[in-house]
Amino acid sequence: MKKNTTLSVPQPCQQRWEEMEYNETGKYCASCQKTVIDFSSASDAVILSALQTNNSICGRIYTNQLNRALINPTEPNPTRIWIVASLLSIIGLGTPTANAQQQPAPIEQLPVLKEVSPDQTNDAPGKTNITGTVQDEMEHPFPGAYVQVKGTKIATTTDINGHFTIKAKKSDELPISFIGYEQKTVEIKNNSNLQIILKPSEQMLLGEVLYVKKPSFFKRLFRKR
């Protein structure tokens, strides 16, 4: 795909993503009887590859992924190839003697650092384990939701059941976020199990995803004549 290719959702769907049932490749929409693929965290190359395989795909996508030039790293850039070739030719102009005398730089051995879970740091007095569950409005858990103690580096993610445990103290605030959903900040008032409900982001669209090739500069020039 060239840089003048963009994505479009001509007719956004009004169905609710959180009410659809999961299947092998996405979620099944009972209204249109199609599978809706979640493109919200997919790269441009992945989306284009899917659209080239099937030109009629319903998807879930952010509005900022639409109407912009797509980047496909699998395609060679002629300008970049020319620059690399020029640099290689310049490097190859060195004398054979100088190249023979050049020794490879020694490889620096870096120390192995022990990984420390961020939610086990800053174990200051008054902090205790706060537990909670992150889910959507249909009570479906969010595995991998990001939970952080505001103003600190203490953070963790939810497990496959949407559960989390984090060290914090009373009056601390926990910003909770998950891709495609609005971030929610919860204030800790007691040590009971927190139940956090996240709502879908208003910047998300559902519908048939199409790619549009804009005409080149020369084609647009001739059309004006």
Image (cartoon, rainbow, N blue to C red):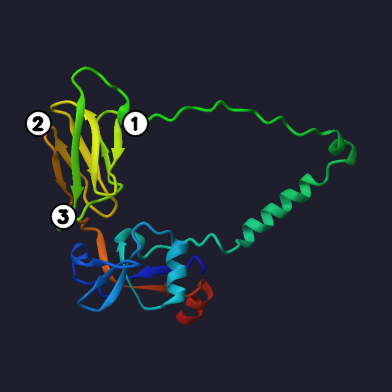
Earlier in the chain: of badge 2 and badge 3, it is 3
Q: Closer to the camera, 145 or 87? A: 145
Which residue corresponds to the image point at 41% horizontal and 68% vertical from the top-left? Answer: 6
Callout 2, which amino acid? Lys
Q: Residue 167's quadrant in the figure?
A: top left
Callout 3, which amino acid? Glu
Q: Report the residue marked by disc 2.
A: 189
What's the distance in space between the residues labelled 2 and 3, CA to CA?
A: 23 Å
Callout 1, which amino acid? Pro
In this rendering, the answer to whether 196 lies above or below 209 is: above
In this rendering, the answer to whether 100 lies above or below 208 is: above
Residue 118 is labelled as 1
Q: In the rendering, at what x and y percent does residue 60 appear?
A: 30, 65
Q: In the rendering, at what x and y percent does residue 180 appear?
A: 27, 55
Earlier in the chain: of badge 3 and badge 1, it is 1
Q: Is residue 194 left or right of residue 222?
A: left
